[in-house]
Image (cartoon, rainbow, N blue to C red):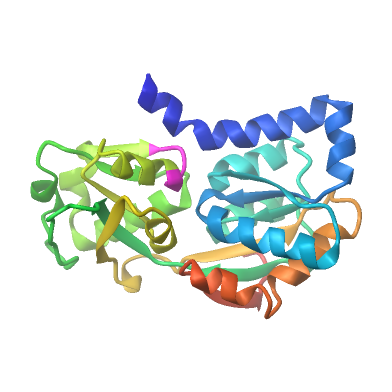
């Protein structure tokens, strides 16, 4: 029960904000006083800092940010949640909203890049080279490999793709502890509930209770790209102003400090 509650924490956070704004006039009024951002869970540390810097520099209300899996957030936006800005951890979920006409395509930008890594507890003695034929199942023993949901969470999808290319997926598929978002997967390793996990490099850097055991070569999975766009129903100029700031030289050091690669390239949906 404890694990199930913890794994759903990010999704519930997003749903609570979305439903609260939709049903509570007072919350709707608060929304008008600050940009509502739906962002991939892996962005929390960097985006919290960047958003606070923007609010201080601009004198505008602090953004209200909901973090969860990109899949969950995209579905909430599709369901009418009042988000102004969406930042996904992969192209697929931004494309999903674009095809439904729920983002302003002219504002869409490929903002950041990332890497996926294999992590263990900070005192882990695990040692592995991520090469074809690697036997992660043996390394796990009776433990489980923590990952985001491999069907919907971007980090889980990247991780599964990498494991398949390494020829390791069939041996570990029954040893996966799937989480609702990548930060929940990280927490399983951080708390010692799973000996190993696949998360973003930026997540590993944000948690002193874990360490990176190995970094997945980038040719094992699709490019990790974080697109951002203003939603179709966003009102007011603050969403565009925040997006402009996130693309600016002032925000770049914040993202790089957390381990992101700054791309900042205009992109269109596929």
Q: Position of residue 190 (x, y in %)?
A: 32, 44
* Left or right relative to 258: residue 170: left
Q: Residue furthest bottom?
A: 249
Observer able to see residue 105: no
Q: In the rendered image, which quarter is residue 52 located in?
A: bottom right
Along the horizontal axis of the image, is 224 left or right of 24? left
Q: Which residues are magenta?
A: 179-183
Q: Say if 33 sits above or below 43 in the image.
A: above
Residue in the foreground of this view, choosing between 253 and 233 = 253
In magenta stretch: residue 182: yes
Place of residue 151 in the rendered image (x, y in percent of width and height, measured from the top left): 42, 43
Instruction: Determine if the magenta segment contains residue 115.
Output: no
Question: What residue do we see at 71% from left, 77% from top?
Answer: 248
Please tell me which residue is depicted at 21% across the width and 44% down the height of the picture: 195
Q: Residue at x 33, y 57 (%)?
A: 161
Report the side of 138 relative to 104 (left or right): left
Looking at the image, can residue 210 be seen?
A: yes
């Amino acid at each position: 029960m404890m694990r199930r509650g913890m794994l759903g924490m990010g999704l519930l956070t997003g749903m609570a904000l979305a439903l609260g704004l939709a049903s509570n006039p007072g919350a709707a009024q608060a929304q008008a006083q600050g940009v509502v951002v739906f962002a991939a869970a892996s962005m929390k540390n960097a985006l919290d800092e960047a958003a606070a810097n923007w609010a201080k520099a601009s004198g505008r209300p602090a953004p209200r940010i909901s973090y969860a899996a990109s899949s969950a957030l995209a579905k909430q936006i599709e369901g009418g949640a009042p988000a102004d800005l969406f930042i996904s951890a992969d192209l697929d979920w931004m494309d999903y909203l674009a095809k439904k006409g729920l983002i302003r395509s002219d504002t869409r930008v490929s903002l950041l890049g990332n890497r996926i890594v294999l992590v263990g507890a900070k005192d882990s003695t695990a040692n592995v080279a991520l090469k074809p034929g690697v036997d992660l199942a043996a390394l796990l023993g009776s433990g489980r490999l923590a990952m985001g949901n491999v069907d919907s969470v971007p980090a889980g999808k990247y991780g599964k793709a990498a494991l398949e290319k390494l020829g390791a997926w069939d041996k570990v598929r029954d040893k996966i502890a799937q989480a609702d978002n990548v930060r929940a997967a990280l927490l399983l390793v951080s708390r010692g509930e799973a000996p190993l996990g696949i998360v973003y490099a930026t997540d590993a850097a944000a948690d002193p209770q874990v360490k990176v055991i190995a970094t997945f070569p980038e040719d094992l999975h699709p490019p990790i790209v974080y697109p951002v766009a203003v939603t179709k129903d966003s009102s007011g100029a603050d969403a565009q102003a925040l997006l402009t700031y996130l693309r600016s030289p002032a925000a770049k050091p914040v993202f790089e400090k957390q381990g992101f690669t700054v791309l900042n390239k205009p992109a269109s949906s596929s």
